[in-house]
Amino acid sequence: MQDLIKVDFDTETVSARDLHKEVGSTERFSTWFDRQLQFGFEVGSDYSNPLKVLRVQIEGEREVSREVKDYNLTIDMAKQICMVQKNEKAKEVRRYLIDLEKAWNTPELVMARGLKAAQNMIADQSKLIEQMKPKAVFADAVTSSKSSILVRDLAKLISQNGAKIGEQRLYKWLRDNGYIFKTSTMPMQKYIEQGLFEVSEFAISKPDGNIITKFTTRVTGKGQAYFIKKFLGVDMDDDN
């Protein structure tokens, strides 16, 4: 089948300017198109809002590129316009569009379009899965973790997954946001009770025989998930 007019098969539309040319109209395009709208066509359902397109026109012996206004027309609108043009070129374009629709709706082409749509959907989902995989795997691993870690190790984990922060900056953030005391590395009691932190205690014997007690703040698996959500924006359920 010889192509009489270019058809966008993805949107099933034709260019109003292409149709204006192919039906052999000698009117100015804007005047011609406004006259077609008198037949009751509606923007959005029959034709698109105006588009700015680049067209190459022959002016004398030169090719000149100009930005012009165009519209995308549905195939039905294009066929109806051809009916009212009352010339052989318009009849030929209308027959072409009818034959094209018949071929378009054969079982083979319907199936081909369905396969193409499915392939595009699978490709989009695969891209999304690849983008989300690092965060999802990391979040799942942390959420299921039963071991607690030091604050400096939490800083490393957060940095390895996109939110760069060091131990000292993380401690400052924890202090500024009220998770630990301003003058120490000890967490607030309410966050210990919520299961975000745990504190390990150990004794050190001094040479003089005195024994001093040291405390180490550790971040639980639940706390790791909580702070990952804060810094990386991973969407996970928590009890806080």
Image (spheres, rainbow, N blue to C red):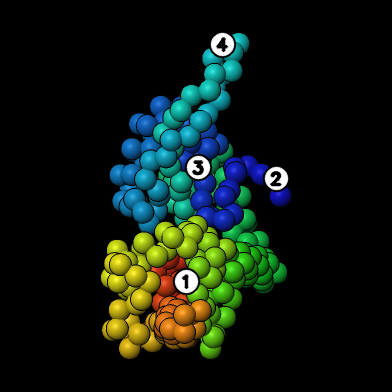
The numbered mark at residue 151 is: 1
Residue placed under numbered mark 4 in the picture: 60
Q: Earlier in the sequence, mark 4 or mark 3?
A: 3
How busy is the neighbourhood of tag 2: few (under 14 within 10 Å), some, or many (20 plus)? few
Q: Is residue 59 above or below residue 6?
A: above
Residue 185's place in the image compared with 23, above or below, is: below
Tell me which label, 2 or 4, sits earlier in the chain. 2
Q: Where residue 146 appears, x then y in whole percent?
A: 53, 88
Lateral position of residue 199 relative to residue 54, left or right: left
Q: Is residue 109 visible?
A: yes
Q: Residues within 10 Å of mark 4 (few under 14, many from 20)?
A: few
Q: Secondary structure at mark 3?
A: strand
The CA distance from mark 2 to mark 1 is 71 Å
Question: Three-letter amino acid code at disc 4?
Answer: Gly
Circle 1 SS class:
helix
Quadrant placement of the C terminus: bottom left
Measuring 47% from the left and 71% from the top, which residue is drawn there? 151
Q: Amino acid at mark 3?
A: Ser
Q: Answer above or below: position of 8 versus 232.
A: above
Q: Earlier in the sequence, mark 1 or mark 4?
A: 4
Q: Are marks 2 and 4 in contact (CB under 8 Å)?
A: no
Q: Residue at x 71, y 50 (%)?
A: 1
Q: Position of residue 205 (x, y in %)?
A: 49, 83
Which label was assigned to residue 15?
3
Please report whichever mark, 3 or 1, sits nearer to the chain's N-terminal start.
3
**In this picture, residue 219 sits left or right of residue 111:** left
How many numbered discs? 4
